[in-house]
Amino acid sequence: MTAARAAVLRSRTLPFRVEDVTLDGPGPGEALVRIAGTGFCPTDLLPRTDRLGVALPLIAGHEGAGTVEATGPGVHEVATGDHVVMSFDSCGACRACLAARPAGCATFFPRNLSGRRTDGTGTALDAAGREVSAHWFGQSSFATHAVVPVRALVPVSRALPLDLLGPLGCGFQTGAGAVVNSLRVQAGSSVVVAGTGAVGLAAVMAARAVGATVVVAVDLLPLRRKLAEELGATHTLDGRSDTLTEELLEITGGADHAVDTTGLPSVITSLIRSLHSEGSCGLVGVQHGDLTVDPLLLASGRTLKGVIEGDAVPRLFVPRLIDLWQQGRFPFDRLIRRYPLDEIDRAERDVTSGEVVKAVLIP
Ligand code: CXF
């Protein structure tokens, strides 16, 4: 049992409340991690909606990085004192995991979005001894400590700024991985990215890093479009435009690839229409409503692909992103603003309003 402080979401409408909690474990195959910093991602706000069914109260947070403080039975891959980035959980034994596609794990949803371990046990109690859903993406890192399955951990060098690295385990991995792993963008190709939050901007940076020569960023906010240009977008467009498809076609001549991070059916439709006849579009955003697609668009050879976690193997991909960052080719740190964990409400406000791309909470 470990005493910790955690930001607990007790109601869909009330602010997070920082409370004393007790964490169970680390059990077999788990490690206890002291959190150095944890990113705030829009997925952490899904429990405010009725779209997931995870029971409140909940400790959210799934982009943590920290130091291993203890390990459970059978853990040999990490040791006390190791610095780790925390990514999503997977089983390691299903068809997708065996094929090095852990984001397609047969038990991805129960492991990451149910709020408990897969054996049904919970991992956190509040000060009154009542159960709090935790184990969110295998971690629940809006806290001083988290109990995490070792498969979700990526060991990193102690020389790196640990508090900033957490979002590499989800948001930045998702955007960059969509470009590198899911769509396999090639040098000299064209890429359209809709939505320039953390995931979209990671896609823009990755597209430039792999040598895409036309990178079009689409967003409603002028400041975000400017930021996208600074990070490598060759063109930017206002997502409100009635002629978005035509403008995209004019710039790209028919795009090789598109990445949607908005989840908006009207935007996705524009992206599909802007592809050339064998182009591919990755859907990364959480969908807002049904998508109607003219099958003729796909019949000619276009691909529409759902993407979770950038189809990444975190232990391979996060170190690659760190290498690119060290070479100045993936400057994710520019997108981050730090907040004390106690100011999680301010972080939520700033992320929701678009004032900040990636809030990182420091517990
Ligand atoms: C999530 C998005 C919703 C489905 C599961 C993966 N990615 C990260 O936040």
Image (tube, rainbow, N blue to C red):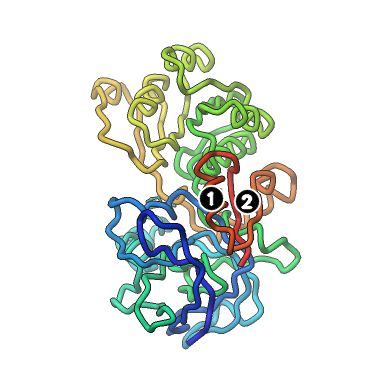
- Give the CA separation, mark 2 to mark 1: 8 Å
- The 10 Å Cα crowd at callout 1, few under 14, some 14 to 19, many 20 or more, is many
Query: In the depicted view, which residue is nearer to us: 42 or 126?
Result: 126
Residue 321's label in the rendered image is 2
Label 1 is placed on what type of residue? Gln
Say left or right for 102 vs 41: left
Instruction: Say if 183 sits above or below 36 in the image.
Output: above
Instruction: Say if 141 sits above or below 25 in the image.
Output: above
- The 10 Å Cα crowd at callout 2, few under 14, some 14 to 19, many 20 or more, is many
Query: In the depicted view, which residue is nearer to us: 218 or 49?
Result: 49
Image point 66% across, 62% down: which residue? 163
Label 2 is placed on what type of residue? Leu
Q: Which residue is identified by label 1?
A: 173
Q: Position of residue 168 (x, y in %)?
A: 58, 54
Q: Position of residue 283 (x, y in %)?
A: 39, 38
Q: Position of residue 98 (x, y in %)?
A: 38, 63
Say left or right for 251 vs 159: left
Image point 45% across, 17% down: which residue? 244
Query: In the depicted view, which residue is nearer to us: 361 or 215?
Result: 361
Image point 40% across, 44% down: which residue? 307
State the SS at label 1.
helix
Q: Are marks 2 and 1 in contact (CB under 8 Å)?
A: yes
Say left or right for 111 vs 248: left
In which quarter of the view is residue 165 placed?
Answer: bottom right
In which quarter of the view is residue 162 placed?
Answer: bottom right
- Farthest residue to the front: give it: 14
